[in-house]
Image (cartoon, rainbow, N blue to C red):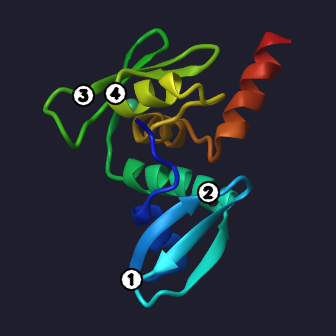
Amino acid sequence: MINIYSITAAIKILGRKDILKLEVWARVIFVKFANGQGRFVSKNLFWIEFHRSRKERAKDLTVGYYDRDLYQVSSQSQIDPYFVSLGDDIQCECADFANQVKAKFRYPICKHAWALLNHLNFNSLSAYIQSNQGKAA
Ligand SMILES: [Zn+2]
């Protein structure tokens, strides 16, 4: 399961570690601190953090060309690299990517996919999507 609204993300967003728990409200997240106080944080900030953390971890990965639309991206958790394919959309065989697909994300993207996009000089997912739509037209 993917948890966008995690305490780990809240620590990064707010820059403080004394977070007790999070409450997911309809439009915002209520963050409760150890001292009993709390504050609201926009859900959007959690999405930004979700992508930022993956982009950050992508920097340590190496990318190699394999065949056709297939690339190999090194893994930090296993010896074998992951295959990442670049067709109409990006696909990776890692668990993070599979979980995002399962959660029905419109544009699933993991750190391996970010590493490949960086390798190909796309600095954002929308830049890749746009260039792909240009090809199809
Ligand atoms: Zn992946």
Q: Nearer the viewer, mark 4 or mark 3?
A: 4
Earlier along the polypeptide chain: callout 2 or callout 3? 2
Amino acid on which the number 3 mark rests in the picture: Pro
Q: Residue under label 4, please give it.
A: 94
Q: Which mark is residue 48?
A: 2
Mark 2 or 3: in front is 2
Q: Earlier in the sequence, mark 2 or mark 1?
A: 1
Three-letter code, disc 4: Cys
Callout count:
4
Residue located at (64% from left, 14% from top): 88
Q: Along the horizontal axis of the image, is 71 left or right of 117?
A: left
Which numbered disc covers residue 18? 1
How far is the residue under mark 2 from the one under mark 4? 21 Å
Relative to residue 123, is residue 136 drawn left or right? right
Q: CA distance from mark 4 to mark 3?
A: 10 Å
The residue that label 3 is drawn on is 81
Q: Is residue 8 placed above or below 127 in the rendered structure? A: below
Q: Position of residue 107 (x, y in %)?
A: 63, 30
**Does the closest atom of ligand 1 sit within 8 Å of the Cβ of label 4?**
yes
Residue at 62% across / 79% down in the picture? 39
